[in-house]
Amino acid sequence: MSGNTAMQFIEMSGKTLLEMARDEGPSPEELAAVGVEDQSVVRVNRQGDIEIRRAHGWDLIGGLLGDFETRVRTQTGLDWA
């Protein structure tokens, strides 16, 4: 890395996050309670923080546990950007 300290995320649909959360992390019920729906736009950073896109910007709504880096990359097919 060339000194780039920008936060890196993987963006996905709420549906993808809800499917992934069945394994480990906040439950689908907990995610639904904070507004995550299938069509939601969410992102996860390398620290496991989950953010949801709202009309005014991004809101932190929770975090993933366990081997989330591998699970996020496997589930989405994306790399950190």
Image (spheres, grey):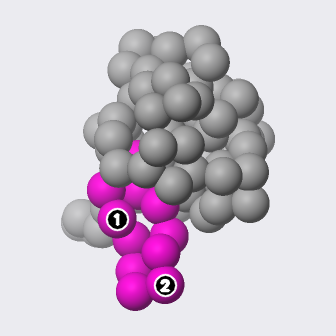
Dominant secondary-structure state across the stretch colored magenta: strand
Regarding residue 45, the answer to whether it shows in the image is no
Residue 39: percent from left, percent from top:
74, 60
Vertical position of residue 9 compared to residue 22: above or below: below
Vertical position of residue 48 compared to residue 61: above or below: above
Q: Residue at x 35, y 50 (%)?
A: 61
* Residue ID for mark 2: 55
Q: Residue at x 49, y 84 (%)?
A: 55
Relative to 37, is 65 on the left or the right?
left
Residue 49: percent from left, percent from top:
34, 44
* Residue ID for mark 1: 59
Q: Give me the disc on residue 11.
A: none
Residue 80: percent from left, percent from top:
52, 51
Which part of the image, by quadrant, shows the N terminus? Answer: bottom left
Q: Quadrant of residue 28?
A: top right
Q: Residue at x 45, y 33 (%)?
A: 30
**Numbered disc 2: secondary structure:** loop
Regarding residue 36, the answer to whether it shows in the image is yes
**Numbered disc 1: secondary structure:** strand
Amino acid type, label 2: Ala
Mark 1: few, some, or many residues within 10 Å (few <14, many ≥20)? few
**Stretch of the chain drawn in magenta:** 50-60
Q: Is residue 7 magenta?
A: no
Mark 2: few, some, or many residues within 10 Å (few <14, many ≥20)? few
Q: Residue at x 74, y 51 (%)?
A: 38
Vertical position of residue 20 compared to residue 66: above or below: below
